[in-house]
Image (cartoon, helix red, strand yellow):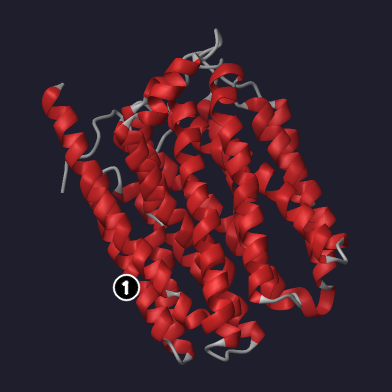
Amino acid sequence: MDEPASSGTSGVIPATDASGRNAWVLTGASFGGMFVFGIVMAVTGALLPRLTIGLGQAGNLIFILSFSMLVAMLCLGPVIDRFGKKVPLAAGSVLVGAALALMAASRSYPSLLAAVAMLGIGGGALNGGTNTLVADLHKDPRRKNAALSLLGVFFGFGALFLPFVIGAMVERLGLGLILGVTAALPAVVALLFFALQFPEPRRAEGLKLSLVGRLARNPLVLLFGLLLFFQSGNEFTIGGYTAAYLTRDVRLPLGAASYLLAAYWAALMVSRMALSRLLLYFNGPGVVMLSGLGAAAGAVLLMLAHSLPAAAAGTVLIGMSFAGIYPTVLGLAGARFEDASGTVFGIIFAIALVGGMTVPWMVGQIAARTGLRTALVLPVFCGVMICVLQALIARRLGRSTANS
């Protein structure tokens, strides 16, 4: 165990940014934005068991969601570094609210695809914007890791919200009304972002394309991105297919499957809450390695499950394991590339979202032919690859430290 980051305060306490603005307010707004992004990531998985579409079409929905996020991320990094975070965050919230409203009114597969595309663009802006903002508010690498993990707790709240409400109230309220009411939440967050003062852009003079190119070719940036490629593939797969798998292959009732999906998000949320403290003391790369192993083991348990207790054990273990990967990797990257964090995060998220597109799509195609149980071998493989890539990152970071 390592020594905690030196500071006169304890816990994850946001520092004040260089312009003198209160970072507590900005951090609170980021929590709201990440809550909305959690809804974005949970909505397809919560809806799939209730939609009369095939597994191939379900894979297309997840592909469109991640592809539209990728488009947003490719534009977001340079925009944030050049113009700041206010407009992307506010606009992203508005797009998510509009997408949920359109989804509630959707009566055809093409209109559902359009709503999911809009959802992905707004969600991508919120994900990249909130992570970059919180990372920039913290100089110390361990506080950066811990703060990003705490931000991820609110992702868990948002992701838990929709499947839990659907499982508890869909019979009384109906799916359309639930989605319509949920659409009001991003609107509130958008108003909050519009009202706040944000720090000045990191590079108001403009970001040179040559620098973007160098960062995009940097081996460490590429390794961070590849690690999150496999993690995003896992997150989109587990979040998108678990409820359908539990009803179709494990033969659980729809209500039980919805609650187990909620348990997955709850495990992720509670684990991130704990990690927001533990990452002040423990080594970040070690947390990522342990999390990758846990994710692979949880996927094996889920793949072999034939009963509610076994499925619950696998689902909860996956949620707990996923908790430490994204925020810790982003903290490591933000500390290493602090002067161009928006652009680096944009590159990393773009690579990650390619995984979010391709892995679930492959799962859908395999599942359409052989069933979801067989297709879950892909999340196992992704968990193993996370460990391999983290070992390579740790070696390169160690070499950089030795040469500095």
**Near-viewer residue (138 or 123):** 123
Is there any visible trace of residue 164 in the rendered image?
no
Spot occupied by residue 113 in the image (x, y as percentages of width and height)? 76, 58
**Near-viewer residue (403 or 136):** 403
| Left or right of 134 in this view: 45 | right
Against 32, residue 258 (above or below) is below
**Near-viewer residue (24 or 29):** 29
Residue type, numbered disc 1: Ala
| Left or right of 220 in this view: 109 | right
Q: Residue at x 80, y 70 (%)?
A: 175
Residue extending farthest to the front is 369
Q: Residue at x 37, y 55 (%)?
A: 274
| Left or right of 54 in this view: 345 | left
Q: Residue at x 50, y 69 (%)?
A: 264
Q: Residue at x 41, y 30 (%)?
A: 216
Instruction: Please tell me whether mark 1 sits on a helix, a strand or a loop.
Output: helix
Is there any visible trace of residue 33 in the rendered image?
yes
**Near-viewer residue (235 or 270):** 235
Spot occupied by residue 196 in the image (x, y as percentages of width and height)? 67, 25
| Left or right of 276 in this view: 249 | right
Spot occupied by residue 257 in the image (x, y as percentages of width and height)? 59, 81
Q: Quadrant of residue 243?
A: bottom right
Residue ID for mark 1:
297
Residue extending farthest to the top is 205
Q: Residues within 10 Å of mark 1 (few under 14, many from 20)?
A: many
Against 110, residue 227 (above or below) is above
Against 181, residue 127 (above or below) is above
